Structures are given as structure tokens and as C-alpha cells.
Image (cartoon, rainbow, N blue to C red):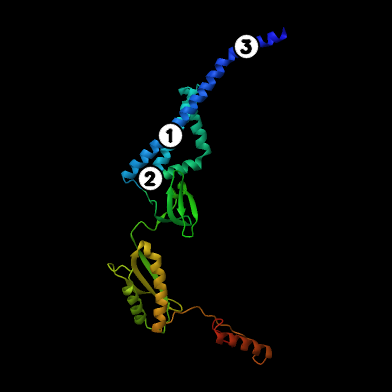
Amino acid sequence: MQAEVMLKKTIDYLSGHLPGFAELIVKIVICALIYVIGKKLIAKLVRVVRAMLDKSHVSPGAATFVVSMLKIILYLTLILGIAMQFGLKESSVAALVASGGVAIGLALQGGLSNLAGGFLILLFQPFQIGDYILTQGQEGTVQKIEILYTTLHTVDNRKVIVPNGNLANNVIVNVTAADRRKLEITVGISYEDSIQTAKAVLQRLLTEHPLVLHDQEAQVFVAELGESSVVLGVRCWVKTDQYFPVLWQLNEQIKEAFDEAGIHIPYPQMDVHMNADKHSPASSARSDCVHEQVCMGLCDTYSFT
């Protein structure tokens, strides 16, 4: 008797709730299908938009930014569409978006600043992918420009991720914006050496160097009369991607050419005055030791009193 009662209650329960379970399962299956199909459609649409941007010769940074924004918008639309399958109404969605937007805006002020910075970078294009920039003590080649961050690749193979908000609000030096750069070198010569001879040596090096651009005049001049040297300046133009090789080569060639011409490059010297008793054995020993070091060239020039 009890078994019949339990069986009847079970049948009544299933008959009352089974349609709801079945409806829920159907909704879950439909939402899963919507997500799978929507994900594939989003991927295909993103590829099409990316191809269109590439054909229209849009800068790589701008194309990456637009594609990223498009993916975010499409995925948010897909999620809201799935939520509406579970009975979420349009009015509720609007209220949820409004309240959620305020909450997210307060919680992600830095993120919104980076987003706005990304828009400014896209609009004004102070740099593009492949440019070498300096900002906030960081420098490197721009590798990626995304919605919130810009990625730099340094010369020592490091990855530096800079928030777009910081880039938009600080000074940016774009080293490779132009196809040529002015190279400047200063070198000091002794006051006893001939200025004209040194200038002629420097001018010859600039004229003979194959990577120095000769469509603009190279300059060699007296930059300063320093405390211990006459400072000569050198200015010439080189291609941007050859700036550092030319700088290093000229530094080496200037030293070698000055040595051949007998021109001296002064360096700091130090005088040590020892006031101890000259007749003291200890003083004599110290003087001999220091004199020996000077003769061997192991330290700077010393004088004794």
C-alpha cells in the first residue's frame, strides 16, 4: 500500500516538473548552439574586416585596435543574446547595461583612461608599429598597439608593456619618424695641438665615410673652450637605421686618426701633494712607491711637495 502511494507521488512529481526540466534542457542546448555558431561567425567576420583593413592600407596599429574593439562588441552582443534566451527582457538588459556601466566605470577608471588613450593614439598616430620610441624612461620598437596597452621590444630582447593612458598623457619621442637623423659628436683636444689640423682630420673622416649623407653639409667646429681641452663638434646626417653603426665607427676612427696625427685627447689628471717630512724613511718609501706606479702607468699623474 505504501509502495503504491510513493509511486503515485513520484509520477505526480515528474508529470508536474518534467516539462520544466525538458524546457530547461532545450534552452541550454539552444544556447550552446548559439554560442558555437556565434563564435564561428565572429571569427569569420573578424577575418573579413581584418582583410579589408589590410587592403585599404590602414596602419597595422589602427587595424589591430579596430579588430580588438569589434571582437569585444560582438562577444558582448552574443552573451546578451544568450541571456535573453533564459527570459531576460530588453528593458532589464538596458537597466543592467546602464547600472553595470556606471559600476564598471568607477571600478576601471585606469582601464577607461587606457581605452581613451588607445583611441587618441589611433586618431593622431604619434607612432606606428615598427617605430622606435622613447617614453617615461622606456624605449624600444613598437611591436603591438592594442586597446589598452602598447608593447615595445627593446634592443636587449625585453618586452615592455606600456598602458595607452600613460602614452597619451606623456611626452613621446619617435626616433624613427623621419628617414634620416642628425649625428653629433664632441671630442676634446689639447690646447697645445693645432685646431686646424684636428678639424681637417675630422672633415676628412666625414668625407670618406660611405654611410654619411653628403647631400647636406657636414660641419666641424669649435664647440667650447673647456677647462682642460678645446672641444670640437661634428655634425652630419645619416639614415635613421644606420645611426648607431656610424656613431660607433666614427668614434673609433677619430681616436685612431688623432693618434696618427699626433693630436692628444686630454683626460682627467690628479695631483697628490704629500706634506710629510722629506727626510723621514716612511715618507721616502711612500714617494718611491708612488713614483714607481706613475712610471709604470698604473695611476694618474702625481706631483710631490
Mark 1–mark 2 CB contact (< 8 Å): no
Q: Position of residue 95 (x, y in %)?
A: 48, 26
**Is the residue 149 above or below the residue 297 in the image?**
above
The residue beneath circle 2 is: 62
At label 3, counting other C-alpha atoms closer than 10 Å, the crowd grade (few under 14, some 14-19, many 20 or more) is few
Q: Which amino acid type is shown beneath numbered disc 2?
A: Ala
Residue 40: assigned label: 1
Determine the residue located farthest toward the bottom in the rendered image: 279
**Is the residue 222 above or below the residue 45 in the image?**
below
Query: Depth check: 130 or 181 in front?
Result: 130
Q: Which amino acid type is shown beneath numbered disc 3?
A: Ile
* Mark 2 secondary-structure assignment: helix
* Mark 1 secondary-structure assignment: helix
Q: Answer with left or right where residue 231 lies relative to residue 161.
A: left
Query: Depth check: 157 or 240 in front?
Result: 157
**Is the residue 107 above or below the residue 160 in the image?**
above
The residue beneath circle 3 is: 11
Q: Which amino acid type is shown beneath numbered disc 1?
A: Lys
Q: Position of residue 87 (x, y in %)?
A: 50, 21
Determine the residue located farthest toward the right in the rendered image: 2
Question: Reading the chain from its start, which is encountered first: label 1 or label 3?
Answer: 3
Mark 1–mark 3 CB contact (< 8 Å): no
At 42% from the left and 74% from the top, the residue drawn is 252
* Mark 3 secondary-structure assignment: helix
Query: Depth check: 224 or 74 in front?
Result: 74
Mark 1–mark 3 distance (CA, rounded to whole Å): 43 Å
Mark 1–mark 2 distance (CA, rounded to whole Å): 24 Å
Q: Answer with left or right where residue 178 lies relative to residue 30.
A: left
Determine the residue located farthest toward the top in the rendered image: 1
Question: Reading the chain from its start, which is encountered first: label 2 or label 3?
Answer: 3
